[in-house]
Structure formats: C-alpha cells, structure tokens
Amino acid sequence: MDINISGRSLNNIGHINVILGKNGCGKSGLLRHLDQYYKGGEQNIGLVKYLSPERGGQLISESGVFDAIQNNLDWGPNQRRRNRVDNFRQMSMAEFKILETLVLRTIENDREIRNSDFTFEDTIKKINGLLDNIKVTRGSRSGFETKGKSDDSNRTPDQLSSGESELISVAIEILSFVYQTKSEGNADKDHILLLDEPDVHLHPDLQARLVKLLVDNVRDQRITVFIATHSTAFLGSLDPELTHVCFMRSGATTYDFLPISEALERTLPIFGAHPLSNVFNNSPILLVEGEDDERIWQQAGRSSRGRIKVWPCAAGDVQSLDEYEDTVSSIIDAVYDDAKAYSLRDRDEEPYDITDKTNVIRCRLNCKAAENLILSDDVLSLLGTTWAEVQARITDWIARNPEHPKNGFMTVFAGNFDRRNANLKEIRLILMDLAGSNKPWEVAVGQGIAALTAASIREDGSLADFLGSKIITALSLMHE
C-alpha cells in the first residue's frame, strides 16, 4: 500500500512499519501527519491511536482523568497526541478499566470464548509476562495494584522503576486498543496504531518482550502499526514476515518501507541496543564473504586480547556482500553520527583497489582468497615451518599420493607455486597437514593477524602483503 500526505510519499506500507532514524529527523512529525491523515476520514478506517513519545505520570487512579475519558471521546486521544503527556500513566490506569470492560463483554458476547476457560486474568497474565520482579493484580474496587512477584508485597507506584511503569502502561494501551478494534461497529474496519518511541526507558530484553506482546496481539487483526524508534534492538525483535522498515533521513519527502531482508536480520544484532552510544564505534561491523572469514576475524579478536575490535558478519558469498554493504550503510546513515563500517572480500580475479560506499570502507585481500593467507610467511612461521619446507613437502606428497582425489589440484598448484594467486580452497586442509598443524586453518590465520606488528615484513610473501595495506590501515591491525 502507498499513500501521499502533504507532499510526503509513503511506499510499500506493511502490517507493522518501523521508522528508524536519529533524534530530530522528523519521525514524530511523520506519525502526527499519519494521525491527521487517517483520522480525517480515510475510507474504511476505524480507530486511530497515537501514543506520545514522552509519557509521564504515575500508575494511580485519578477520578478526573477517568471522568474526562468517559465524558469526552476526544479527550484521551487528544491528550496522547501531545509531544509530552504528564498524566499519561494515569490515563493508562483509566484505560485498564476500559480494557477490563471490553474483555468481559467479549466473553459475554462470544459463546465459544464463554465456554472456554478464558477470563480477564488471562489478559493480566500477558502484562505480567513482561515483568520480572512485580506483577499486576486486580484491585479490590477497580483498576489494579502492583505487588512483588516473590513475596506478594504491595508496591506503590513510586516504588516502580521507570521501565516497569513504562511496560505496564504501554501494554495496557496496546491491549485496550486491540480489544476496541474487535468491538461492535469496528470489527469490519481497518485500524491504525501509531507508537512513538515505545522503547523509551526499556532495557533491550524488555524491548523484546514488549515487541512480542505487540506482535502476538496484532498479528491476525486488521491493524496497521507504525513505530518511530532509534532502537535497533526493538526493530531486530520484530517478526520479519510482518515488518517493513524505513530508514529516515532529515529533509526526506519519500519514505520507502522495505521488507526485513536476511542482511538486515543478520546485521541488526551487531548494532546493539542503543545505536546512539559509542559502542558501535568502538567495535564496528566487519562484513566478510563467508563463515570461514568470519571465524578468522573472530579468532583475530580473541588472540589480540581485545586490541582488534571488530564484529565480523558473514554475508554468505560475494554477491550478497553488496546487499549487506547497502543495508549497513542505510542503518548507519539513519541512526549514527560519524560512524563507519568495513567490508573485506577476496580479490579473486579483480583488481585490488575498490571504491568505498557511504559509511562503508570496502577492502579486498591482496591475494586470491582467505585460504592463501595460510601460506604467508607469518602464518607458516607460527606453525613452525617455512614456505621452502612446505614446497618440498607438497612435491613429495604428490609423488606419494598419485590416486588421491586432490592430487590434481596439488599438481596444478605445484606447477608454479604461486601461493598468492592459486586457488587453494580444495587443498587447504592438506596444506595445513603438510605445515605440521592439526588446528583449524581459520584459527592459524586469525592468530597470524593478531600477531602482526609494525615491524612485520611487507615484502612479497608476508601476511601484511597478502592482506593488503587498506584493511591493515583501516582496522589498525599493526601493533608495536
């Protein structure tokens, strides 16, 4: 679905739509435009609910708030549309009473549900599933109370953490909206839920729980959800089959909502819980072709004792690497200031030089593939041998193993012993054996990278030469 609002084009809208962007880029403004657009009489649109980004107050019952909601249908929605709502949680307490009434009416009107074991307590359990240390219980008169899960002790609203209050409040708002869409006169319409930064005050684990509650309750409903956030953890917890994402930039007027691709699924966890922190800059993502390359750089990080700080991520193959680079560049551009990512691919038959993409420093090995790094002087030295000794062992191996299925590959290689440009993929394990080592080849290469020093020889045959100067400089691989 595509829509146009006040000169803004929103393309490919899905069931759940995430607007990911920096503070101040216009996420809230876009949600408000959507709010005005949908509540302005769009065909077959039923309920529209917008949740403010700054939600204050305490989880206490205030009769004035409840009366205002009951007596004026527009009062609650208009309050929630403000940028800051100081009595938001008092409104959520009133919304809990509405939720209770809606659930009980559903039970009363639906014979199948009425004949089951379903009660309002099942709805309360959904809220309590979000919480570790406290629980919500029905109050003695109306509304709810909060108690400790371990000791059943009463917890007053001011004893709750901001995260606990936030979870309870937003969960009530979501569940109440879902039940309202099912009520008489609304069931045959489409509805819109606009959530402005629902991740505020929430640890990444709690964000994931809130996402699950949201997805479980809107999955089969005629509800289109728009979420403004700068949390990659929140986005990464959503169901890829239901979710489209827009990377928002300041000043944009066209917003393309893209399905969550494999590249986005794989890279999002690396960006961490709060992308506006310095965590990512300290350990940037390194995109590599395959899992072998990923293991090499994981080992390099371990063996360097944290000096080499990168998060390797395998794209699967060189064709996918371009997509991963574009995806990572979009994430960085939408949520970071002055951050960089890196990618490293085999050279294969390509020239060494490669053009960078926005926010992504792109590098090639200065040898055919990662397997060729095994035969660099530095790695062979770590394995206790030399290139001259390995050449002699290869020649002897060929003579002693004429029927071996890999003999042909070894013979071709021995034709010129071009350790930089030969295709060694099929014989890498044999080469490790001839080097006198039974460790995985990726471990040996990673250890070699971790051991690079400023004094490392860069002449032909050295590991530094095989890696190439660009990746060495980009990741500051050399140490004193």
Image (spheres, grey):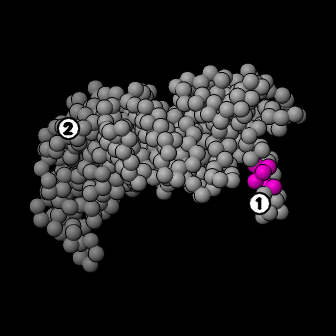
Q: Is residue 300 visible?
A: no
Q: Is residue 21 visible?
A: yes
Q: Mark 1 — residue?
A: 110
Could you tell me which residue is drawn at 62 percent across and 33 percent down? Answer: 74
Q: Are marks 1 and 2 in contact (CB under 8 Å)?
A: no
Amino acid at dot 2? Lys
Where is the C terminus found, in terms of image quarters? top left
Residue 12 circle label: none
What is the x, y in percent for residue 326?
29, 46
Specify start and end residues of the magenta stretch as a single range. 103-108
Label 2: which secondary element: helix
Label 1: which secondary element: loop
Image quadrant where residue 460 sits:
top left
What is the x, y in percent for residue 29?
43, 31
Q: Mark 2 — residue?
A: 470
Could you tell me which residue is drawn at 77 percent across and 60 percent down? Answer: 110
Q: Is residue 107 magenta?
A: yes
Amino acid at dot 1? Asp
What is the x, y in percent for residue 370?
27, 52
Compared to residue 356, the image places residue 66 above or below, namely above
Q: Is residue 373 magenta?
A: no
Q: How many marks?
A: 2
